[in-house]
Amino acid sequence: MIKKLFAYAGEYKKFAIATPFLVAGEVILEILIPLIMAELIDKGIDAGNMNLIVKYGVMLVVFAMVALFFGVASGRTAALGSTGFAKNLRGAMFEHVQDYSFANIDKFSTGSIVTRLTTDVSNVQMAFQMTTRMAMRAPMVLIFALVAAFRIDTQLSLIFLGVIPFLAIGLFAIVFKTFPIFDKVFKKYDNLNNVVQENLYGMRVVKSFNRQEFETEKFKGASNEIYKDFVRAEKILAFNAPLMQISMYACMIMLSWFGARAIVASGNDAVIGLSTGELIGLFTYVMQILMSLMIISMLFVMMTMAKASGERILEIIEEVSTLQDPENPIYEVKDGSVDFENVHFRYMNRGGKEVLNGINLHIESGQTIGIIGATGSAKSSLVQLIPRLYDVAAGSVKVGGVDVRDYHVESLRHQVAFVLQKNTLFSGTIKENLRWGKEDATDEEIKKVCELACADEFIQKMENGYDTYIEQGGTNVSGGQRQRLCIARALLKNPKILILDDSTSAVDMKTDAMIRQAFKEEIPNTTKIIIAQRIASVQDADQIIVMDDGKLSAVGNHHYLMENSDIYREVYESQNKQGGEADE
């Protein structure tokens, strides 16, 4: 996992590699400083030698300043390396998500992807920074300080070796207990983000139904679950501090006791002889050794969190799109003809139940096709197979006489314009939104497609016209206006196939008729597939498809279906009766 993640350090690897060398310089100087202090005390101050006091004093200042330089430099390179690593990692994740098929997106919730892009990357970034700096510094300090301590006094330094196993066992137990908790916490973060996203997206519905209190309680519940798990983890982690303090004070007490006895005994030809400066040096090394152990314990905790986050990040990066281009893809779409040949389809996250069953259908290029059916009859699922948003489970879908799986995916989708059931506009001007259909579209081209979509009239009435700013999600325009802008955006692609998935439901019948008439006159060679709830929206189509529970119930023009399809006739009579009552 570490190797896979580190590959995304990219151009910032040089900072990650430079950091340990700078840390090594800092550590070496910090280890030498106590030895010089001991010399200063024993040979300078105790002996009253002013020359040595000045000499060692200057050395201390120089060493401290150089150590400070190395410390600042290592901190800078560690920060540059970790932030660059996080930037590349987020970029790679976002790029992978863009390549996902709808089936891949269905696997991860939006909240989960957001958590992985933010919280999980931040955890891995912090671990990366600590690894390149602290993970190098702490073991080096520990080893060098132990060597220096043994150099001063071998027997007294054995005190440290007695404490290290005690600390190691304690730290391992803490990490072992906390890892499963952190693993659960990040999954609950996904749920929390889902609650927030759902609430903000549906804020108007929440307020219109006066459900603020319910949503607040739902958020508190999700937040409380995270709180409980973090409290459990922190209760275990709280043992870290007393564990370190027990070890530190035990070392200091034993070192003070035995060290003082050694100093007293040093004038009596004792086996252990110790000077005041050496004892002070040992105390310094005690602090360095125990602080390095404390840092190591913090690293273990951070690595525990980072491990869980790293696994979740790799799930996103290593997820392979279910849609792959063939080895020798076809780049040109001949025409807008569509053929469904014994098509079966199921969503992977719905228990294997078939959504489409044995679909056989031929659509001529340039035809206008209407699709009606009850909610859940798989109308949207049928048309989503045409631009290969999903792949069939069995059978084949052909566009221009070629199986869609043989096309280069981007080339196919350039020729299929899809106005989805949920119309989405992005923050930016109207022009910027429309140019999603064609990046280099001229103002004249934009105006023309807006006229076709009956959008030009209301745009001209806006204060800034086509430069009017659209809020995120298009919240500052009506549903009908949003639908017409999305239709105009699709027309700007000049596609061979235009699919409208219930995309005129929010416009009045007159405007709906005007849009269809414009399609008939201005884009006669484009295949137009219109999913609608109103029969009036598809009544004049060349073919009308009646869907029922994932199957083709009937196919034909209006007159044929009125005579041969009970479902179509019932819907028509129901809608006409309602229209008649409304007129009366």
Image: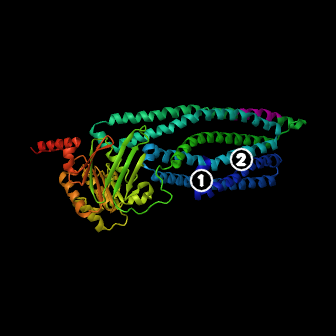
Residue at the spot 73% in from the left edge and 51% down from the top edge: 28
Indicate yes or no whether the magenta region holds residue 260.
yes
Q: Position of residue 489 (x, y in %)?
A: 32, 59
Region in magenta: 248-261
Q: Secondary structure at mark 2?
A: helix
Q: Is residue 108 left or right of residue 428?
A: right
Q: Position of residue 136 (x, y in %)?
A: 67, 48
Quarter residue 299 falls in: top right
User: 95 and 35: which one is in front?
Assistant: 95
Residue with the mark numbered 2:
140
Give the label, 1 or 2, closer to the camera: 1
Q: Is residue 330 left or right of residue 39?
A: left
The image shows residue 67, relative to residue 108, as above or below, that is below
Residue with the mark numbered 1:
7
* Few, some or many residues within 10 Å of mark 1 (<14, 14–19, 20+): few
- The reply to whether residue 122 is in sight is no
* Few, some or many residues within 10 Å of mark 2 (<14, 14–19, 20+): some
The image shows residue 349, relative to residue 365, as above or below, that is above
Amino acid at dot 1 = Ala
User: 426 and 212: which one is in front?
Assistant: 426
Q: Secondary structure at mark 1?
A: helix
The dot on residue 415 is none
Q: Position of residue 3 (x, y in %)?
A: 62, 49
Residue positioned most to the right = 269
Residue at the spot 48% in from the left edge and 56% down from the top edge: 325
